Image: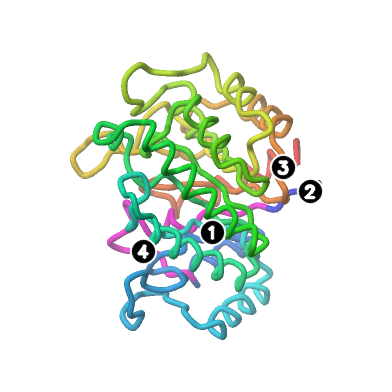
Amino acid sequence: MSRRVSIGTWAYTIGPYSAHPVPFDTVCDKLKELGFDGVELGAFPPHPNPGNPNGPDADWPGALPEKSQRAELRAQMEARGLGFSGIAANLWGEKLLNTEDPSKYVQEFRRNCEFAVDLGIGGVRVDTVQPPTILRELDAATAFKRIGSTWRTCANIAADHGLNMVWEFEPGFAFNKPSEITRVHDLVDRPNFGLMYDTCHGEMVGVVGARQEGEKEVFASQLEFIRFLSGRIIHLHLIDSDGTCHKDANGEDETSAHPPFGLGHLNFDELVPAILKASDIPHDWWTIDLCFWPNAWEATAACKKAVDALVEKYG
């Protein structure tokens, strides 16, 4: 299978770019110029999104509440020769683990599924919303019960829309230990629900154990972690790791740093074949993730060349 290469558009809208986001059209024009095949859409302002979860949409940047608007965007992307490898749903304003009533979360997930279908996107990315410290406020059994129930409902909704539901585990969100990851996957237990493997998160979660509550649970290498997750991976993000986290406004560890290729220590000649052997990815996309990197815009071209080289070897 030949591979198409995309990049997550959130790299140009959040973190260091939150005060000066790169417009979506500018991103797409530049990516086309660099030879990308598409984008993974961060479906939140100011880039295209399904609209204000609290309504109204009038002053919500990037809102595309109407099917006609979405059809126009889809046509524009097709005219550029660009596709969508997936979307990251804007669910961070909702409660997931710390509520007995997940109806608002489920409602917003459904809206993102409808948005994805209208744009011809095959999968919706989610995370556990709350930080790992939330498990200090409620017992683990309750948290597992809630996420299992809510995400089963969401996976069923995604299936009804012909979509996959992809969980991106990472240091900055609850259930960031390997055994917790497989437990959640087993609890949801739906054929269209699987894991996203981000090579930087893989290092920070599986090897470093960043932001794990209590006793750390790690492997000697990512290769062991990947084997542990065999058969569960359905989406892939490629980026380097230097073994550190991005820092929040208070200088505390937030989530994986996502340095560009060559600024970390990962051996992709080992990792990529191992991931391909352990995964069951139902599409041909490989996605670059420069989330929170301060010079993501300038680093994009070099990252594309690095992934092109991996595609040439393994794709």
Q: With respect to residue 307, does 108 lie above or below?
A: below
Q: Which residues are magenta?
A: 5-24
What number of labels is visible? Answer: 4
Q: Which residue is mark 2?
A: 2
Relative side of 173 to 137, left or right: right
For numbered disc 1, what is the local secondary structure?
A: strand
For numbered disc 4, what is the local secondary structure?
A: loop
Relative side of 271 to 182, left or right: right
Q: With respect to residue 122, does 50 lie above or below?
A: below
Between circles 3 and 2, the one closer to the viewer is 2
Instruction: Identify which residue is drawn at 65% across, 52% down.
Output: 5
Instruction: Mark 4: give few (<14), some (14-19) or many (20+) Cα within 10 Å.
Output: some
The spot of residue 81 in percent (x, y) is 68, 69
Q: Earlier in the sequence, mark 2 or mark 4?
A: 2
Q: Which residue is mark 4?
A: 21
For numbered disc 2, what is the local secondary structure?
A: loop
For numbered disc 3, what is the local secondary structure?
A: helix
The tag on residue 34 is none
- Residue 210 quadrant: top left
Q: Which residue is mark 3?
A: 311
Q: Earlier in the sequence, mark 1 or mark 4?
A: 4
Name the one closer to the observer, 178 or 243: 178
* Quadrant (top left, top right, bottom left, bottom right) of the C terminus: top right
The spot of residue 83 in percent (x, y) is 65, 64
The tag on residue 87 is 1
Q: Type of residue at label 2?
A: Ser
Instruction: Mark 3: give few (<14), some (14-19) or many (20+) Cα within 10 Å.
Output: some
Instruction: Identify which residue is drawn at 50% across, 24% down.
Output: 179
Disc 2 to disc 4, C-alpha distance: 32 Å
